[in-house]
Image: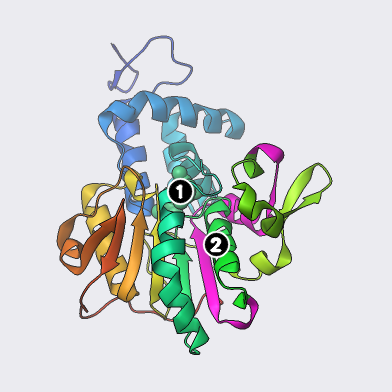
Amino acid sequence: MTRGANGQVQDHDDQEYPFTERDFAMIAEIAHRRYGLYLQASKKPLVYSRLTKRLRALALPNFETYCQLLSEPQGQQEHAHLLSALTTNVTHFFREMHHFTALREKILPSLIEKARSGSPVRIWSSACSAGQEAFSIAAVIRKEARDFASLDIKILATDVDPQMIQKAREATYDHEQTDAIPAEYKTTMIEQNGDSFKIKPDIMKMVTFGELNLVDPWPMRRKFDIIFCRNAAIYFDKETQSRLWQRFSDSINISGHLMIGHSERLTGPAQAHFRNVGITTYQRLTDTAGGEITEKRMGI
Ligand SMILES: C[S@@+](CC[C@H](N)C(=O)[O-])C[C@H]1O[C@@H](n2cnc3c(N)ncnc32)[C@H](O)[C@@H]1O
């Protein structure tokens, strides 16, 4: 360890840029305030290596100037890069298959009945990355309800990362990505498009994509029948997670379901409103007062 020109402790002499405790604390504060991310001290080397690429790309002399940029109006676009650098967009079709099995066997039959009786069914893929999760849900619905096109069943798919939403809207995936689609869904789900594969139009029609930061206010008015929030809350601190589960609880219809990631657990007051009905699968029990103030619909 050494001390930099500003007297702050630095970890290594051989680093390309000085990275002080203060720099790390500033990055961690911005990431927490803006995205609810929790960067514990052990993440310092990772943060350094991921963000060094951004300093290089922006030709900035040090982390202090980078933090300054993040707090200025002209640096607002950089927040998306900061988030991408600190989280991962890793996903795949039918990831955590047990949720799709539960969807097919236990959850969809009554929701399809609900839709056939004329009521809308709404599903939210709330950290959808490049769209594979939402398209997998749509493919299961398409297979289970032959009359799906005449039913009012819609999927809202959102992510905070604009680049991921752009990819999701393109709905084009390469061979390695589509290999994860089980054979029984392949022909109804994708079609060859040059060297890659495109999601078929009737599957795409079921899904509406939008940018949404889970720690900001949500603009949706309707409650959902199912919310998928998998492998995103893991980046949040405990308080932000608990608040998020509570907000989901306020946004799910009675008897609706919440699916979370394999290493995530429901915590805080929301636990009282859900019962565990399968692997990281929860069902909404009772009503709660309040909920989010909502201003407009996100296209569904
Ligand atoms: C590891 S991917 C998970 C994708 C998919 N849900 C799955 O389980 O395969 C995590 C996603 O969470 C998104 N994310 C991280 N923080 C977020 C936030 N504050 N609001 C919305 N999405 C966020 C990231 O952009 C990323 O696409």
The vertical placement of 15 against 229, above or below, is above
Give the extent of the magenta segment.
Answer: 149-176
User: Is the residue at mark 1 in contact range of ligand 1, meaning its CB lies under 8 Å from it?
Assistant: no
Magenta span has 186?
no
Query: Does residue 296 show up?
Result: no
Q: Residues within 10 Å of mark 1 (few under 14, many from 20)?
A: few
Residue 283 appears in the figure = yes
268 horizontally vs 300: left or right: left
Residue at x-position 48% and y-position 46%: 95
Q: Secondary structure at mark 2?
A: helix
**Camera-side residue: 90 or 95?**
95
Residue 250 placement: quadrant: bottom left
Furthest residue toward bottom: 118
Q: Classify 109 as above or below 20.
A: below
Residue 13 locus on image (x, y percent): 39, 9
Circle number at residue 140? 2
Disc 1 versus disc 2: distance between alpha carbons? 11 Å
**From the image, which quarter does the N terminus lie in?**
top left
- The three-letter code of the residue at mark 2 reads Val
Residue drawn at point x = 47 percent, y = 40 percent: 88
Q: Could you tell me the amino acid type at mark 1?
A: Met
- Closest to the observer: 126 or 176? 176
Q: Quadrant of residue 217?
A: bottom left
**Is residue 154 in the magenta section?**
yes
Point out the residue furthest to the right here.
194
Instruction: Please tell me which residue lies in front, 199 or 221.
Output: 199
Q: Which mark is residue 97?
A: 1
